[in-house]
Every structure is written in structure tokens, then in C-alpha cells.
Image: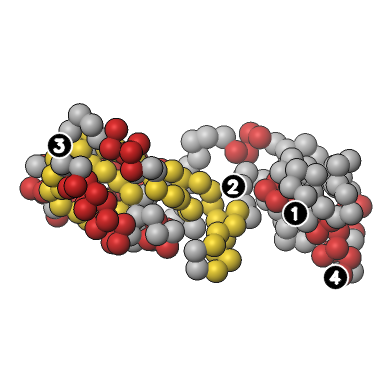
Amino acid sequence: MIVSKQKPFTEILATLEPVSRIFLIGCAKCATVCKSGGEEQLWQMQEDLTAAGKEVTGSLVIDEACHMLRVQRDLRSKGEQVKNAEALLVLACGAGVQSVSTASDRLTVAGLDTLFLGNIRRFGQFEQRCSLCGHCILNETGGICPVTICPKGLLNGPCGGMDEGKCEVNPEAECAWCQIYQRLHDRGEQAPLSAANPPRDFSRNLRPGSLKLEK
């Protein structure tokens, strides 16, 4: 899931300074789980904006704000409320904000900072395990991603700063490559470590990415 957090209200208010009528948009998926852009956060945002002298013309929580066609459909269903607004404040990830900005000619304002692709440890606790680098080597590293878990993104073994299995950059964290070695050792699968990983091929992670499934 995409992990996000709400921008400071003062920053949002400063961006909305030129306008007085605002329509609010949230996302029922990732932003709701992160408690940054669900129903509860939209209601709170409406209260805060109203207290700040703004008029909220309406609100909408889209099932998947990153789904561009769905965003177009749902905005049409709120026709007058959207038309009466001078700006759309979107409490969704960057993908959701851009779905909205593509679907509307209104000023679109991002209310969240998009942080990373995260795993859920437990409710309210998220951890980055994947960097979306486009070149997955998890089959060689026991299912642990050194590109993400190692702060230096090393592809082959620990750096010289590792100390007794702890990370040089974050001494409270386990070294990613020590974890990889231990996991493979426990499984009797050290063979993947016998060959060095080549330098990363950044051409496999060109942006903007796109994928069209074959029919």
C-alpha cells in the first residue's frame, strides 16, 4: 500500500489562500488505512477549513483515487458541488492527486505527502520493504531487499561500517546483509551468495513507468 501523511494544516491553508470555496476528496484505500484521507479526516478537514473562514461545497471519498476513469465518474456525480468550488483539496497519494487534476479544470491541491510503498506491521505501523526499483533480486537474497533495507542500497554484502550485525547508519537496526546471510544459512541456501550481483541496470526503472497488459 502507499503510505502517506497529511501536510501541516498551515501549509494547506497557505496553498488555499487565493480561494474561498473548496471541494474535498479522499481515498477509501491507502489513505484511509493511513488515517490521512478517509471519511474521518475529511470531516476534520471540513471543520478546520470552516473555522478558517473557508466554504466547503462538498466532499467525496473515492474508492480508488488512483483509478483515473473512476475519478472522472465520481466527480461527475458531484457535478454542482464541484462546479461551485474554486479548488479541489485531495487527501490521497500523489497518484490520486494527479487523477483528480487530469479529470478537472479546477485548481487541485495536494493535502498529503506521499511517503513510500509500505508493508503493514500492525494497525498504524508501516514499514518500507520495497523501493519499486524495477529489478527484483529477492530470489537471490532470501526474500530480503537490500536495495531498500540497507540504507546504502548495497547489492553485495555488508559495508565496512557494519558492527556486530548492526547497521552503521542506524545502529539500532540489523544489517540487511547480515539478515540475508543468516536467513539463507538457516535454510541451507548459501549458494545464491556465491555469485556477485552485477551493478544495477537503471534503464529498467525509467520514469514515468507504464504497463499495458496483453489481452
In which quadrant is the C terminus drawn? bottom left
Q: Specify the amino acid type for callout 4.
A: Arg
Q: Residue at x 33, y 43 (%)?
A: 9
- State which tag comes first along the sequence, 3 or 4: 3
- State which tag comes first along the sequence, 2 or 1: 2
Please name whichever residue, 27 or 189, is drawn nearer the observer in this view of the structure. 27
The label shown at residue 172 is 1
- Helix, strand or loop for disc 3: loop
Q: Residue at x 77, y 61 (%)?
A: 142
Point out residue 35 in the picture as x, y percentages from the top left corner: 40, 59
Mark 4: give few (<14), some (14-19) or many (20+) Cα within 10 Å: few
Q: Residue at x 21, y 53 (%)?
A: 47
Q: CB under 8 Å between callouts 3 and 2?
A: no
Res 19 quadrant in image: top left
Q: Specify the amino acid type for callout 2.
A: Leu
- Helix, strand or loop for disc 1: loop
The label shown at residue 187 is 4
Q: Determine the CA span between mark 3 and mark 4.
A: 61 Å
- To which residue does mark 3 refer? 20
Q: Specify the amino acid type for callout 3.
A: Ser
- State which tag comes first along the sequence, 3 or 2: 3
Point out residue 14 in the picture as x, y percentages from the top left corner: 29, 33
- To which residue does mark 2 refer? 132
Q: CB under 8 Å between callouts 1 and 3?
A: no
Q: Determine the CA span between mark 1 and mark 4.
A: 25 Å
Count of numbered tags = 4
Mark 3: give few (<14), some (14-19) or many (20+) Cα within 10 Å: some
Q: Specify the amino acid type for callout 1.
A: Glu
Point out residue 84 in the picture as x, y percentages from the top left corner: 9, 42
**Tell me, what colour scheme is on the image?**
secondary structure
